[in-house]
């Protein structure tokens, strides 16, 4: 039997498959925020941890963003990092504001922010970038993670001369399934901070096999139509 396909039917099939390719091109996994509502141990470098577990997330990671809701305390005292299922990690906060001219860091109270590599403004120097605050005094909006992979008790000069390298791209190319851990510490006594909640947005792309199957299907349709036009059985 000769399979015949009109040009219109072929066009519809190709467009349909193209739509599948576009839809398969990127999966976005949004995890709901984890409610913690725990006071961060004050003056304790052992800090606290909170975890999110992901499962059945297809493909490999292309980007990660983090939401943080922290109230009270003294922002310049806080150190936070995120570690992923494969051992990768990024420094989210490292005593924001500490520099050679400010050994204590910023004295604002709390964060209600998104941390993303897409932002041009690093959280460490937020007071230099026209920050905005909500009614509770928390810093708001989207910022790049601190990324300074140094001892949080380093001198201000070390902070000034350290290039942020431990950013969220460290998770790219890996799988998302497994346990994600947020670590948060308050390194100075006085003025308690509370971790209210946090969450992740993980963007992945499918494995290459998915693309091969879709593109292969388009190739078969084109080949069949060409054979029909040539009058071959």
Image (cartoon, helix red, strand yellow):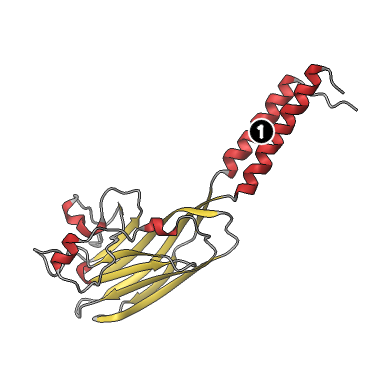
Instruction: Give how far across and how far down residue 191 sits, in percent.
Output: 21, 76
Name the residue at the right extreme.
1
The answer to which of 75 and 91 lies nearer the viewer is 91
Taking 223 as reference, is 177 above or below it? below
Name the residue at the left extreme.
101
Quadrant of res 123? bottom left
Instruction: Give how far across and how far down residue 138 sits, in percent.
Output: 25, 61
Residue at 31% over, 73% down: 194
Taking 53 as reference, is 208 above or below it? above
Quadrant of res 166? bottom left
Badge 1 marks a residue whose secondary structure is helix
Taking 47 as reference, is 158 above or below it? above
From the image, which quarter does the C terminus lie in?
top right
Residue at 49% over, 67% down: 86
Instruction: Give how far across and how far down residue 69 sits, in percent.
Output: 34, 64
Q: Residues within 10 Å of mark 1 (few under 14, many from 20)?
A: few
Question: Which residue lies under the disc numbered 1?
Answer: 16
The answer to which of 195 and 212 lies nearer the viewer is 212
From the image, which quarter does the N terminus lie in?
top right
Instruction: Give how far across and how far down residue 206 sits, in percent.
Output: 58, 50
> Is residue 134 among what the camera can see?
no
> Is residue 99 among what the camera can see?
yes
Q: How many marks?
A: 1
- Report whether 24 appears left or right of 96: right
Quadrant of res 12? top right
Residue at 20% over, 74% down: 153
The answer to which of 197 and 148 lies nearer the viewer is 148
- Report whether 217 appears left or right of 202: right
């Amino acid at each position: 039997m000769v399979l015949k396909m009109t040009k219109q039917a072929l066009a519809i099939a190709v467009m349909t498959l193209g739509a599948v390719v576009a839809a398969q091109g990127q999966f976005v996994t949004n995890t709901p925020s984890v409610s913690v509502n725990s006071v961060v141990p004050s003056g304790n470098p052992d800090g606290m941890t909170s975890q999110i577990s992901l499962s059945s997330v297809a493909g490999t990671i292309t980007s990660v963003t983090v939401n943080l809701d922290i109230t009270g305390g003294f922002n310049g005292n806080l150190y936070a990092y995120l570690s992923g299922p494969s051992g990768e990690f990024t420094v989210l906060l490292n005593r924001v504001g500490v520099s050679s001219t400010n050994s204590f860091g910023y004295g604002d109270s709390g964060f209600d922010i998104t941390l993303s590599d897409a932002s041009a403004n690093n959280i460490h120097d937020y007071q230099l970038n026209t920050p905005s605050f909500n009614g509770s005094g928390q810093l708001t909006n989207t910022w790049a993670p601190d990324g300074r992979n140094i001892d949080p008790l380093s001198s201000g000069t070390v902070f000034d001369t350290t290039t942020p390298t431990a950013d969220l791209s460290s998770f790219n190319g890996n799988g998302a399934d497994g346990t994600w851990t947020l670590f948060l510490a308050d390194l100075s006594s006085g003025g308690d901070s509370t971790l209210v909640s946090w969450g992740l947005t993980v963007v992945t792309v499918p494995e290459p096999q998915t693309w091969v199957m879709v593109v292969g299907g388009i190739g078969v349709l084109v080949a069949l139509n060409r054979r029909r036009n040539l009058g071959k059985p």
